[in-house]
Amino acid sequence: MVLDERTKKYLKIFALLAFVLLLTGCTNNMDAHGKLKASRAITEATKWTPKAGFFDFLLVIPIAKGILFLNNVTGNILWGVIGMTVLINLIILPIMIKSTVSMQKMQMIQPEMEKIQNKYKGKTDQASQLRMSAEIQKLYKDNDVSMFSSFATFLTLPIMFAMYAAVQRVQVLYSSTAFTLNLGATPMGQIGKGQFAYIILIAVMGLTQWLAIEINNIMLKRNPNYKESQQQKSMKSMNYIMVLMIVYFGLTMPAAMSFYWITTNIITIIRTVFIQIYFIEKADEEKKKKDANVIR
């Protein structure tokens, strides 16, 4: 299956809209005054029952209960959020390793793929389309790329969505403080009152979010054979838009969510660097040594 540029463009727009709907959908947990709705709050007394709904029963409530358990152990709800975020990311690490390796391979061959697509540009007859598909499939095979393995990331999305929802619905967060900041207050409202420490919080969140998005490109540039493709260039503007969107939501949602985003971003950066060094570059070195031994 080969996607044309128009289809890719629509898929990017769809992904961005889905992201917006996720964030705005989560705001249904809040009332018109930005307070957590009592009916959506999760406490230690909240029953873990199927009556709560399939998604809440399977993922959201267990994760929220985990946060509350770590809060009791550490004495600070923020450490509960951070600890649970780390644990969830460790659980999905094997999937993320496979997905990241596959995605980077796909990005490395993107310039060659664009050459093939440009070669058949304007040729809409069936024979030309079949030849283009055959050449792209050969490119995948020669570079050990499976275009479907990168979709493994989508398997982790329900867990990540549940983590996001759980953090937002843990009631004790809204009456807690961390680093002198009220976790239940919205940064925008506090900045308006002259509490400029919240500006630092949002700035750190925005910076780590940008790095979490950009880190993959930074790691790609470590490969001497890397060439930036047109598709990657076109994604830059969308990445900036996504960062601005998250900063906006960080300003208008409780400060606890900003700490959650910062934790997730730092984990993403560390994970990407770890996978690059120990699963991509190490594998490339071993392949080069193996090829050198075969030549001898």
Image (cartoon, rainbow, N blue to C red):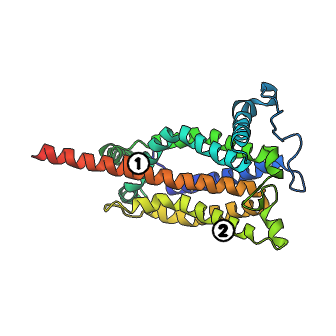
- What label sits on residue 203 in the rendered view? 2
As displayed, is residue 246 above or below residue 76?
A: below
Residue at 90%, 55% in the rendered image? 32
Residue 231 visible somewhere in the drawing: no
Report if the CB atoms under discs 2 and 1 are less than 8 Å apart: no
Position of residue 76 measured from the top left corner of the image (x, y, whole percent)? 72, 48
Q: Nearer the viewer, residue 223 or 112?
A: 223
As displayed, is residue 276 above or below residue 237?
A: above
- Give the quarter of the figure containing the N terminus: top left
Q: Quadrant of residue 92?
A: top right
Residue at 16%, 48% in the rendered image? 292
Q: Earlier in the sequence, mark 2 or mark 1?
A: 1
Graded by Cα atoms within 10 Å as few (under 14), some (14 to 19) or many (20 or more), the crowding at tag 1 reads: some
As displayed, is residue 286 above or below residue 229?
A: above
Position of residue 243 measured from the top left corner of the image (x, y, whole percent)? 63, 63
Q: Amino acid at mark 2?
A: Ala
Position of residue 131 measured from the top left corner of the image (x, y, whole percent)? 35, 47
Q: Secondary structure at mark 2?
A: helix
Gap between marks 2 and 1, in whole Å?
A: 48 Å
Residue that badge 1 annotates = 129
Nearer the camera: disc 2 or disc 1? 2
Residue at 61%, 42% in the rendered image? 157
Q: Secondary structure at mark 1?
A: helix
- What label sits on residue 184 in the rendered view? none
Q: Amino acid at mark 1?
A: Gln
Residue at 82%, 45% in the rendered image? 171
Residue 173 visible somewhere in the drawing: yes
Q: Nearer the viewer, residue 90 or 176?
A: 176
Graded by Cα atoms within 10 Å as few (under 14), some (14 to 19) or many (20 or more), the crowding at tag 2 reads: few
